[in-house]
Structure formats: structure tokens, C-alpha cells
Amino acid sequence: MSATDDDLDTQFGELFGDDIEPLGGKGANHISKPAQVTPGVLQRRKSAQQEQVVEGNFLDPISSITQIDPHEFLEFARPGVQYGVYKNLRMGKYEIQSRLDLHRHTVEQARSALFRFVDDCQKHGVRCGLVTHGKGIGLDQPAKLKSCVNHWLRQFDQVLAFHTAQKTHGGAGSTYVLIKKNRVARQKTSDMLEQARRSKHS
């Protein structure tokens, strides 16, 4: 059973250039000349820099992130989030209005995807989202994406709370995210409450 909206108030050539060639012969005494910075390389670098500026992604790089256990439960709530609201989130009682699946993403792809996801959720009035990051069991670095999500979600002002999902939604491999209402949604709620107050006293 989903809770009502009122209960929720509270993403070799690129790197080195196209003109790099393999070492000739056996390579024992061969010293390759430095790579030339061609106009094409400069343009790609410029485009990448512009994209980063436009995106404004402030999320920390993986070097800043503490690794957690694959089975660890994620839990976070900002001061002011009501206990009942957080409990409903933890229990999976809110309707999942948007989903993000990070399987097969690199860390940098996940960083970009999560940034866009949270931003889009707030812009479109999504209150509860589900991020699937997996547990990474069996990999060289287990829970890499899970650790990143745990760290990154805390950096968003738009994120009011998050918690590991119920088994039906992926368990320890997924996380519920509670998004702050945007200005339009807050005004809509305010108008509804005011209308209800007037009806009660009419």
C-alpha cells in the first residue's frame, strides 16, 4: 500500500590522440616520439571540460570514498525528517516513482548517472526513487558502487533520506531515496492544505 504524497513532506584514442602508433620492431631500443597534441585532441579536451562545467557535478571522486561491506544496510536521514516518514521509507511503503539501475556502470558513469537522476527527480516532482547498485560480491573490489552511492547521496541537498530497500525491491543491492519537493510541488501541497482548511471551516 503506497503512502500519500502529503506523508512525504519532509553518467586509447581519446586519451593519447589518434596519431599514436605501437612501438616498431621488438621495442628493445626504440624510443617513441612524444604524442602530438593535434587540433582534434584539443577540441575533445575542450568539449570534455565544457561538459563538466555545464553538468556541474560536485560528487566526490572514488579516492574520497570509504568502502563498506557488501551486506551493510544504508541508512541516512537529515535533521527534521519525521520519524514516521523515515520509517515508511525504510519499510518500502512509498510508491517508487523513478528507478536508476547502475549495473555494468563504471564508477565515473555511475557518478554522472546518479547526479542526473537526483536532479531529474526533483525537477519532475518525484518524491521516492530506487537506485539499484548491486553488492559487487565476487568482484576484486566488492561493493564499489554501493559504497559510492552511500557517499554521494549524502552530498545532495535534494536528498532528505535514503535507506537500503526491502527484499522485494532488491534488498542490500538497492536503496530507496527520498527527494525534497521542488517549489512547484510545495506550492501545490500548500494550496491543497489551504483548500482543506477552508472547506473544514465553511
Image (cartoon, rainbow, N blue to C red):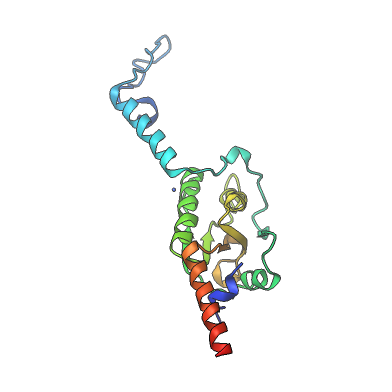
Quadrant of the image for the N terminus? Answer: bottom right
In-image side of 66 versus 49 (left or right)? right
Q: In this view, does 113 lie above or below 41?
A: below
Check the image and name the residue furthest to the front.
202
| In the foreground, 110 or 160 | 160
Q: How many labels does the image show?
A: 0
| In the foreground, 33 or 92 | 92
Q: Residue at x 41, y 33 (%)?
A: 49
Coordinates of residue 84 in the picture (x, y in percent): 68, 73
Coordinates of residue 108 in the picture (x, y in percent): 49, 43
Is residue 96 visible in the rendered structure shown here?
A: yes
Coordinates of residue 120 in the picture (x, y in percent): 44, 58
Is residue 102 visible in the rendered structure shown here?
A: no
Q: Which residue is drawn at 60% across and 45% down?
A: 141
Q: Residue at x 57, y 83 (%)?
A: 197
Coordinates of residue 113 in the picture (x, y in percent): 46, 51
Quadrant of the image for the C terminus? Answer: bottom right
Q: In this view, does 156 lie above or below 195?
A: above
| In the foreground, 140 or 160 | 160
Q: Residue at x 34, y 16 (%)?
A: 24
Check the image and name the residue furthest to the bottom.
202
